[in-house]
Amino acid sequence: MRKQFVAAVRFSCAYNLDDKNQLVDMLREYVHTVKLICESSCEKTNSIEIKDKARDQEIASLGTVLQCILDCNLQSADMLDKEIKYRILELKAIKGN
């Protein structure tokens, strides 16, 4: 299910089905969902390895969203790409804790 948002945005871009704001909103929802999943996984354990794995998965998902934003030329429609880059830096900074 996690990859469906990005696939839906790519499909919509390819066929010009939605405006850019709707597509960015879909990606924003996905980014929020991925963050909640990571935070939930980290709260459930004291294991640094499991927390790092959850953070790595969120970083990978965010990277996929960034690539989708670039591929679909959505970077000017919203500040989402900057928010994602900041979140990635934040996750990398807390890895190992």
Image: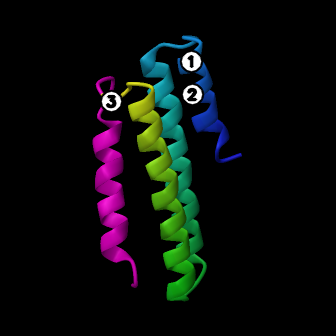
Q: Is residue 91 magenta?
A: yes
Vertical order, 76 against 52 (above or below): above
Give the spatial CA distance, label 2 vs label 1: 6 Å
Q: What type of secondary structure mainly makes up the magenta span?
A: helix
Q: Secondary structure at mark 1?
A: helix
Vertical order, 33 against 50 (above or below): above
Query: Can you tell which mark lies on residue 14?
Result: 1
Q: Could you say which is closer to the camera, residue 19 or residue 63? A: 63
Residue 55, image x and y in percent?
48, 68
Q: Secondary structure at mark 3?
A: loop
Look at the image and name its color scheme: rainbow
Q: Splitting the image into 4 quarters, where does residue 4 fall?
A: top right
Residue span colored magenta: 76-97
Give the spatial CA distance, label 1 vs label 3: 16 Å
Query: Can you tell which mark lies on residue 78?
Result: none
Judging by the rendered image, the residue that carries numbered circle 3 is 75
**Comparing marks 1 and 3, which lies closer to the viewer?**
1
Residue 62, image x and y in percent?
46, 51
Q: How packed is label 3: few (under 14 Cα within 10 Å), some, or many (20 or more)?
A: some
Residue 65 as seen in the image, left or right of residue 33: left
Vertical order, 26 against 62 (above or below): above
Q: Earlier in the sequence, mark 3 or mark 2?
A: 2
Residue 65, image x and y in percent?
47, 42
Residue pictured at 29% horizontal, 34% vertical: 79
Judging by the rendered image, the residue that carries numbered circle 2 is 10
Q: Secondary structure at mark 2?
A: helix
Q: Earlier in the sequence, mark 1 or mark 3?
A: 1
Looking at this view, name the residue that lies furthest to the right: 1
